[in-house]
Image: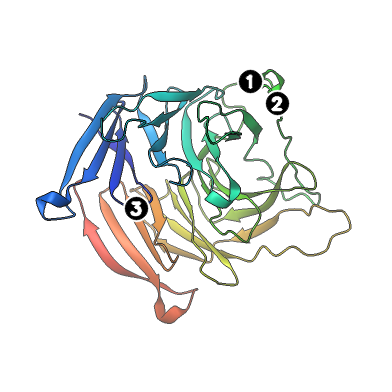
């Protein structure tokens, strides 16, 4: 029934959600009764969208143990919740239909940021929604909407602060024309609880951009532009930080490359308040397969091992050699069916 385009484990790794080109969502549970944690059984399957589904994510169990969000080429984001645990029924509890083009990425915020959901679309907009009442997961008003791929051609000497949406959808900017703005392909929250709310966004112009929420301006400030790819980005991943003095961000591109950036985004005093964005080159390019697009990157829980996958079906694991963060080597390879 169609290609699987994305999968996501729940917080405990006991359930798995898969989505694909057949427009269905499937929920799988580890069947420990079978004597192996690798035995999985499908507990729910339903037609979810009117077009291929591109992403699926789980919410943190602090808010709900059975809440997922999906995004699709039908321009919608839908939230589903299994309210009768074990019954296999996952009704749609909210539909977010602000995008004017396919929605390519969706991500719940880290638990310390609150019950927020960010999305990126081919129309160029980054949108953030929030459930003001965790007891009512049917309401997800938008709290921000702005173009996520600004500041790419030249690096301005002035800060770039987004226009932030507060209130009803009637105040949204006018719909962009086709091809007018640079599309967005992926996003990931900064998982660190000691940092402000931050997002890294992978863009169709081959750049990744880091946006930070500013309590001073009430908007999102472009903090950095990450360079290193020649074609659009398919995925970005912000590494968990168990105590390092820097951050690591990885990306997968259509050009076949996997890039890693090392960044220290400490704020320096600036009398103007917000600062112009930094332009940061990739610390290392791990692989170059020009005819084989890279599709996914993901870190382990300590941010020390990176997994990457390509359209050919190859999956590779990388770690830094002798704890030298600038030197990475392959420590495992898996070849699946393409």
Q: In this view, does 172 lie to the left or right of 261?
A: right
Number of marks in the image? 3
Give the residue number, with chain letter if any, for mark 3: 12
- Residue 241: percent from left, percent from top: 52, 65
Which SS class for mark 3? loop
Residue, far left: 34
Which quarter shows the C terminus?
A: top left
Query: Can residue 209 be seen from the camera position used here?
Result: no
Disc 2: CA contacts within 10 A as few (<14), some (14-19) or many (>=20):
few
- Residue 62: percent from left, percent from top: 47, 47
Query: Residue at the spot x=47%, y=38% of the render?
Result: 105
Rounded to the nearest angstrom, the CA distance separating label 3 from label 1 is 40 Å
Which SS class for mark 2? loop
Disc 1: CA contacts within 10 A as few (<14), some (14-19) or many (>=20):
few
Give the residue number, with chain letter if any, for mark 1: 175
Residue, far bottom: 322
Rounded to the nearest angstrom, the CA distance separating label 1 from label 2 is 18 Å
Label 3–label 1 contact, CB within 8 A: no
Q: Is residue 35 left or right of residue 87?
A: left
Nearer to us of marks 3 and 2 is: 3
Which quarter shows the N terminus?
A: top left
- Residue 321: percent from left, percent from top: 40, 78
């Amino acid at each position: 029934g169609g290609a699987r385009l994305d999968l996501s484990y729940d917080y405990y790794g006991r359930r798995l959600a898969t989505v694909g080109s057949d427009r269905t969502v499937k929920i799988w549970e580890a069947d420990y009764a079978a004597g192996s944690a690798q035995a999985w059984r499908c507990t729910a399957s339903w037609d979810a969208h009117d077009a291929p589904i591109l992403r699926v994510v789980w919410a943190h169990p602090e808010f709900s143990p059975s809440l997922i969000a999906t995004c699709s080429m039908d321009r919608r984001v839908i939230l589903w919740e299994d309210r009768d645990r074990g019954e296999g029924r996952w009704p749609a509890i909210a539909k977010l239909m602000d995008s004017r083009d396919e929605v390519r990425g969706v991500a719940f915020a880290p638990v310390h940021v609150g019950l927020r959901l960010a999305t990126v679309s081919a129309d160029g907009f980054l949108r953030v929604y929030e459930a003001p009442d965790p007891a009512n997961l049917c309401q997800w008003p938008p709290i921000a909407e702005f173009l996520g791929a600004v500041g790419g051609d030249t690096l301005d000497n002035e800060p770039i602060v987004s226009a932030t949406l507060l209130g009803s959808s009637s105040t949204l900017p006018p719909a962009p024309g086709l091809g007018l703005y640079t599309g967005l392909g992926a996003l990931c929250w900064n998982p660190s609880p000691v940092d402000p709310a931050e997002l890294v966004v992978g863009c169709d112009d081959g750049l990744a951009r880091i946006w930070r929420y500013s309590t001073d301006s009430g908007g999102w400030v472009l903090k950095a532009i990450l360079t290193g790819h020649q074609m659009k980005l398919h995925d970005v991943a912000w590494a968990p930080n168990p105590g390092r003095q820097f951050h690591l961000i990885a990306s997968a591109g259509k050009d076949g490359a996997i890039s890693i950036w090392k960044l220290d985004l400490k704020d320096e005093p600036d009398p103007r308040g917000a600062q112009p964005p930094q332009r940061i080159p990739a610390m290392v390019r791990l692989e170059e397969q020009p005819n084989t697009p890279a599709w996914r990157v993901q870190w382990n829980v300590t941010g020390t091992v990176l997994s990457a996958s390509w359209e050919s079906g190859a999956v590779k694991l990388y770690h830094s050699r002798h704890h030298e963060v600038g030197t990475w080597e392959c420590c495992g390879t898996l070849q699946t069916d393409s």
